[in-house]
Image (cartoon, grey):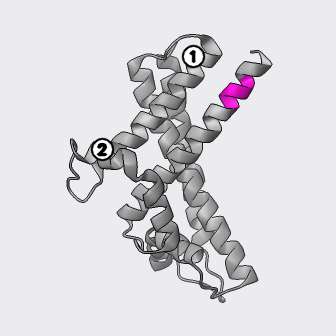
Amino acid sequence: MTYLLQAVGTLVQFVVGIYLMLVLLRFLFQLVRADFYNPLSQAIVTATNPPLRFLRKFVPGFGGIDWPSIILLFSIQALEISLMAILLTGSMPSPMALIVLSLAHLLQLTGYIYMFCIFILVVISWINPGAYNPLTVLLYQLTDPLMREVRRRIPPTAGLDWSPMVVLLGIYLFMSLVVAPLMDFGNTLNR
């Protein structure tokens, strides 16, 4: 690959990846019912509203799930995979491979977001426990459903909360046992 194509590929992955992360965060915040009026939530809503407003004209939310966000996530991820495939190989991936790879990449990004959020919360709890700012509020609201379930089953011992380690281990296993085979399967469909 030439240096120009490599630079274009990096730029595509960066720009699309940032926007994809914003849409995914919006979806996850809606799913866990995070504070909509938090300044960071409002910034994400403002950045992701134009395409979602358009999609909502045709696709309604159903069953408490924001289907326009899911369609936008899959569309953006499929676009990124297609652009990278064209840059690297000069051809488009098959439709089935595109669907499987998009799902795998979105699950991987979700896992990375949760891993990063939990890691940041652990560091904050060591440096400045009980700190209050808009970021920590959203991080707690996003990770609380996972952490609460683990805390119910494994209570803190000697003042040490094991839930972040258990959740991180669970995410790692999910990435190894579900996401990696899904990506491999998508890549085999593309050959």
Q: Nearer the viewer, residue 135 or 170?
A: 135
Give the quadrant of residue 45: bottom left
Where is residue 86 shown, x and y percent of the image? 57, 16
Q: Is residue 139 left or right of residue 127?
A: left
Where is residue 1 shown, x and y percent of the image? 74, 15
Q: Is residue 68 left or right of residue 187?
A: left
Q: Nearer the viewer, residue 98 or 10?
A: 10
**Which residue position is annotated with label 2?**
54
Residue sitting at x 69%, y 32%: 10
Secondary structure mostly seen in magenta is helix
Where is residue 182 shown, x and y percent of the image? 49, 33
Which range is magenta? Answer: 6-10
Ranked by sequence position, the earlier of labels 2 and 1 is: 2
Give the quadrant of residue 156: bottom right
Q: Name the mark on residue 70.
A: none
Q: Amino acid at mark 1?
A: Ile
Q: Are marks 2 and 1 in contact (CB under 8 Å)?
A: no
Question: Where 30 falls versus 23 (above or below)?
Answer: below
Q: Is residue 116 left or right of residue 150?
A: right
Q: Answer whether residue 186 is visible to the viewer in this image.
A: yes
Q: Amino acid at mark 2?
A: Phe
Give the quadrant of residue 139: bottom right
Residue sitting at x 66%, y 66%: 119
**Which residue position is annotated with label 1?**
86
Where is residue 143 shown, x and y percent of the image? 50, 68
Q: Secondary structure at mark 2?
A: helix
CA gap, disc 2 and disc 1: 28 Å
Q: Secondary structure at mark 1?
A: helix
Q: Nearer the viewer, mark 2 or mark 1?
A: 2
